[in-house]
Amino acid sequence: MATNTATSNGVSANDQLDGANKEYGANTDYNSSTNGSNRQMTHEEHQTARAAARFGYGPLAHISTDDTDRLPAFGGEFQPGSYRAVKDRKFANPAPLGLSAFALTTFVLGLINMGTRGVAAPNIVVGIAFGYGGLVQLLAGMWEMAVGNTFGATALSSYGGFWIAFAIILTPGGFQIEASLDATDGGSPAAFLDSFGFFLMGWFIFTTILLLCTLRSTLAFFSLFFFLDLAFLLLGIGYLQRNAAGAPNPPIIKAGGFFALLAAFMAWYNALAGIADDSNSRDANTNLSFFVLPVVHFPWSKVGQEKRKSERATV
């Protein structure tokens, strides 16, 4: 095995090991996971850790290295700047595929939630949720793992699972989930509506967690999760706080559908930003698109701070 093998986060094993030896010494101390006492690595353990670090895991694979190895935050690659570059990437960027799958499914459901043209039943979403928003987005999340993007893998795989679960719940005559819940409450839909509200509120919490990870990224990336977070919150409230007739609260559901539409358009925007990017060209200096979409880095982000420093230097 070559001694300069790159790890999955784009930092060579030798760089990590050099950093480990400088910071901790050849015999690194670590906290034992079995009895909580501190002890030194044996020679055999140290050699095993060195071998593991070549593949990006183990106690020597997490040594702090130069922050310049980090990619700038970019919604088109569905990462908020929290993982290191994959050197000589041999995979295409899977983020636009996952974003597009999410966008289309969310767009259709948002229109239905808003009652567009009198359509109220979400039956048409079931097929889209199984095939495009579910399966395709889940696959995109798995491919994000291959390129080393933990955030993208977590988000796209989770929302792919959301759409599959959504389709399973609402499959007409299929899994009988709604009918079974109605039967437990004497035929009243209250049990199902409450349960579905809990389901949506859970996704609101999860989306809030992801939203916090985008606070130092870009406006386009942050806006996607901000609008989606509001959509989940409003839809959850709409199912839990029903109207006098016991149905989901129409004004709140429509408001949730509106924010779902905004989230869908922001997902498409980030997808286009990822497609119309020079990373899709064989030549890094050549952009295959006639334009590059602005993503607007926050002033407090790493890119924003570097931009301000360069502007001060030119004054």
Image (cartoon, helix red, strand yellow):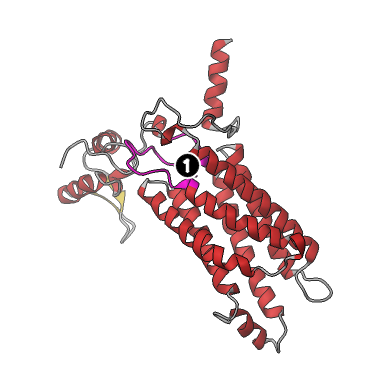
Left or right: where 183 falls relative to 255: left
Q: Nearer the viewer, residue 158 or 102?
A: 102
Above or below, comparing residue 73 to residue 315 in the picture: below
Q: From what the image shows, is residue 55 above or below residue 163? A: above
The residue under the point 36% across, 32% down is 282
Residue 89 in the image: x percent, y percent? 34, 39
Q: Quick one: label 1, few (<14), some, or many (20+) residues within 10 Å?
A: many
**Is 122 part of what is drawn in magenta?**
no
Circle 1 residue: 77
Q: Which portion, as a residue range, is magenta?
A: 71-96
| Side of 294 relative to 118 (left or right) | left
> At 40% from the left edge and 25% from the top edge, which residue is drawn?
285
Report the front residue among 278 and 179.
Answer: 278
Direction top: furthest residue: 315
Q: Main secondary structure of the magenta part?
A: loop
Dividing the picture into quadrants, the one containing residue 3 is top left
Seen as rendered, the residue at the extreme right is: 244
Residue at the spot x=42%, y=34% of the render? 279
Q: Position of residue 77 (x, y in %)?
A: 47, 42
Q: Residue at x 57, y 16 (%)?
A: 311
**Looking at the picture, how far across and down is residue 35, in whole percent?**
31, 61
